[in-house]
Amino acid sequence: MSEPTIFERIIEGDVPGHIVYETETVAAFLDANPLTPGHTLVVPKEPYTRLRDAPPEVVTDVFEAVRTLSPAIEDAVDADAATIGVNDGTAAGQEVSHLHVHVVPRFEGDGGGSIHTAVGSVADLDDDEIGEIGSEIAARLG
Ligand code: 5GP
């Protein structure tokens, strides 16, 4: 059996963590290295690595929890907005191999960027090239 992930250990109470929400399938706790006050991680209790690995009903539970939690988180820290995102795979910056959604409260003038700043540049593609990629994606969905 593989070692439990750090997030499983938090959920089990083996590692200290500030759990703010829990259902049968989902848990949410404060990030230990918050980007802003209230930065929260929402995770399935089962340690699926990536979004694609989790069954649809679990993904639904996770995103329902995100929807429930994000206004509570924003209100708790008097935030103006939130950046909500998943680093889905190591090349995207995923460090913990247990699917998690970041809810990062945002404040007017906090100096941070949008999700567009995650890559730092815009792909040099014309409309035909964008369309070809669209066709490739659609072809894989049957
Ligand atoms: P990733 O880069 O995988 O999307 O993000 C992993 C997140 O987990 C980081 O924001 C990091 O601060 C957080 N994290 C890593 N270890 C711990 C821990 O032991 N406890 C908590 N609460 N958060 C952690």
Image (cartoon, grey):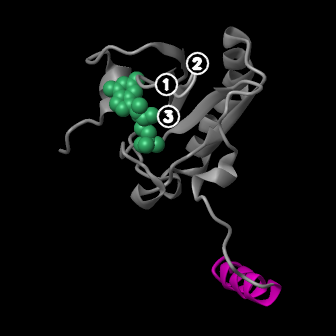
Q: Quarter-wise, where is residue 67 in the image? A: top right
| Residue of label 3 | 43
Q: Is residue 38 rendered to the left or right of residue 18?
A: right
Query: Quarter holding the C terminus?
Result: bottom right
58 shown above or below 76: below
What residue is at 55 percent from the left and 25 percent from the top? 40
Q: Is the C-beta of the residue carrying label 1 under 8 Å from the nearest atom of ligand 1? A: yes
Q: Which residues are magenta?
A: 127-142
> Could you tell me the amino acid type at mark 2?
Gly
Q: Is residue 110 rendered to the left or right of residue 40?
A: right
Dot 2 lies on which element? loop
| Residue of label 2 | 38
Query: Looking at the magenta stretch, what is its main secondary structure?
Result: helix
90 shown above or below 38: below
| Residue of label 1 | 34
Which sits in the foreground, 58 or 71?
71
Callout 2–callout 1 Cβ contact below 8 Å: yes
What residue is at 37 percent from the left and 45 percent from the top? 95
> Could you tell me the amino acid type at mark 3?
Val
